[in-house]
Image: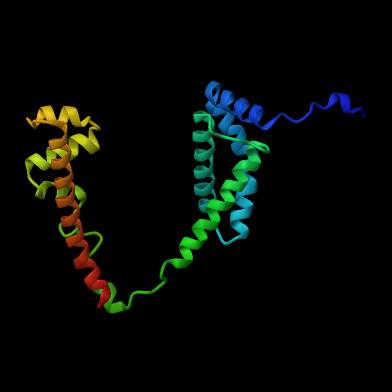
Amino acid sequence: MTTDLIPPPAPPADRAAALRAALLTDRPGTLTGLYRRTFPMVERHVRRHGGSGQDAQDVFQDALIVLYEKAVAGTLTLTAAPSTFLVAISRNLWRRELQRRRQLPHTELSPAQAEELPDAEAPAEAASVLDYLAQLGERCQSILLSFYYHRQPLEQIAATHDYGSVRSATVQKFKCLERLRQAVRTAWAGTADLLAR
C-alpha cells in the first residue's frame, strides 16, 4: 500500500472552515452525521461515570451547541476531528455536572415536613409567575410582557408608554422587574420556612 493514496490531514484552520461550510450548507445532515459518529462514545463515557442515557443526551446536546456556535461564528479552532472536540467538550461538561451534583445537599424530608408542603395538585395555592405579574399593576405588566415576552425594543416601549426617553423606560422596567422578583422571593420564603421546620 502506498502512502500516495492517503491524503495528508487537513490543517486545523481548514478543518474548522470545512465544518463551518458544511454546517452552513447542510446543517441537519452535518449535525446528524456528527451525532451518529460521536454520541455513542459520549454515552459510554457518561454511563461509566454514573450517568444515565438522558444525562448523556443532555451533555451531548450542550456540546453540540458549543461546537455549532463556535463554528458558525468562525471562532472554532480544531486541532483534531470534530468528533474528538465534541467528546472532549462532553467530558468536561459531564465532569462539571458531577461536581455540581456532589455539592447539592441530599437530604430526605421527614414525614412531618412532607405533610406541610403545599399539595402539588392544588392550583389555588400555587402561583405562577403570571400571577405575581398580575399583582404588579397594569403598567408594570405591560412593560415586562412587552420586553420579555414580545421582545419589543425599549425604544418602542418608551414610545408606547409615553416615557420621555429610553433611559426612563429602562429604569421603569428595572423597577418593575425588582418588584416581581421581590414578590416571588417573598412567596418562596414561606415555602423555605416550611422546609426548615
x then y, percent, for residue 69: 49, 34
Q: Is residue 25 left or right of residue 197?
A: right
Q: In this view, does 17 lie to the left or right of 54?
A: right
Q: Is residue 68 left or right of residue 139?
A: right
Query: In terms of depth relative to the viewer, which is nearer, 83 or 116?
Result: 83
Does any portion of residue 117 appear in the rendered image?
no
Say if 49 sits above or below 114 in the image.
above
Does any portion of residue 155 appear in the rendered image?
yes
Q: Name the quarter where the N terminus is drawn.
A: top right
Name the residue furthest top. Answer: 25
Name the residue furthest right. Answer: 1
Q: Name the quarter where the C terminus is drawn.
A: bottom left
x then y, percent, for residue 58: 49, 48
* Residue sitting at x 91%, y 27%: 2
* Residue sitting at x 52%, y 49%: 59
x then y, percent, for residue 3: 88, 28
Query: In terms of depth relative to the viewer, which is nearer, 87 or 119?
Result: 87
Task: Count the labels in the image.
Answer: 0
Say if 112 sits above or below 45 in the image.
below
* Residue sitting at x 57%, y 46%: 89
Query: In terms of depth relative to the viewer, which is nearer, 74 or 47?
Result: 74
